[in-house]
Image: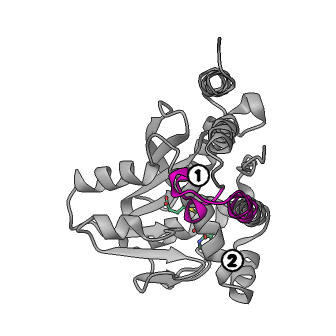
Amino acid sequence: MEGKRSKKRKRAKRLKFQNEKDDSAAVEEIDERKEEEESAACAFAKRPKSQGLSKSSTFLEKMRARLSGGHFRMINEKLYTCTGKEALEYFKEDPELFNVYHAGYQEQMSHWPEKPVNIIIKWLKDHSPSLVVADFGCGDAQLAKNVKNKVFSFDLVANDPSVIACDMSKTPLDSSVVDVAVFCLSLMGTNLASYLKEAHRVLKSRGWLLIAEVRSRFDPNTGGADPKTFSKAVCELGFTSIFKDFSNKMFILLYFKKKDKQTSKKTKEIEWPELKPCLYKRR
Ligand code: SAH
């Protein structure tokens, strides 16, 4: 006879493979497995069953984890639906929220078969270490920690001394000083065009713009943006599209190079497609 657990696993598998394009489905799959483990929405609240916890402490842990998970989802939604300036103020008022966000983010990432930041790290390792890099929305600065290059790491809160805290639409860098600008799952604000504009400003001509974004945000079948329209808008800012990779189930990669000549339009004159927020569902 088929057990409840194996049925659940099968359903989770089905969800995963039927909805390859839908990251929220993948999140749902993760949630189900976690429920089985009586585990948590947050990695730090996880503890193996074998420690013989009493029923009540397991229950408390579960509740605490659910609260943290809910908190993460709330902060995540906030970041996708406000401007960078508002997000900066939000975290300034309570920097602890940034840690809650990142604990939840790391938990979600731990279930992705491949992390986009590792693809970008590999790309940098395959190129000259003399390339100067700007990591826009660096999180815990994994990029800087794993390459030999000089990396300027920017985020709303500096949770590492190497990180420069700022709204990335206004970095403290001079113009034309970096060879590579990276946005790894960080095009979150409603003013994301101004982040790309800033990357264009700080990049040297023929410098690289590397974007990794959540796949569902670029799936027109589920209300996402058309990647072609997005690419076109980025090109109008003064870039040439060099490489696109849609092979990963969770994220897409779009690589551009800054044009030699100043042919860029103003961001307001460009028609930017709306990138829908990447919201994580609660079961
Ligand atoms: N690039 C990292 C972290 C991705 S999470 C990685 O791949 O692991 C997205 C990050 O972008 C968050 O840390 C968030 O705080 C940051 N971010 C979002 N909007 C920002 C803004 N306007 N300015 C600076 N950082 C921003």
The picture places residue 72, in percent across and down from the top left corner, at 71, 63
**91 is higher (above) or lower (below) than 14:** below
Which amino acid, mark 1? Answer: Gln
Q: Determine the image quadrant of residue 3.
A: top right
Task: Looking at the image, tell me whether mark 1 or mark 2 is earlier in sequence order.
Answer: 2
Residue bearing mark 2: 97
**Region of the chain picked out in magenta, as a range:** 41-64
Mark 2: secondary structure: helix
Task: Look at the image and say whether residue 54 sits in the magenta stretch.
Answer: yes
Task: Specify the amino acid type for callout 2.
Answer: Leu
Residue 148 in sight in this render? yes
Nearer to the camera, 120 or 26: 26
Q: Could you tell me what secondary structure mostly forms the magenta stretch?
A: helix
Q: Nearer the viewer, residue 27 or 223?
A: 27
User: Where does the image place residue 131, in percent across and percent down from the top left?
Assistant: 27, 66
Q: Which residue is mark 1?
A: 108
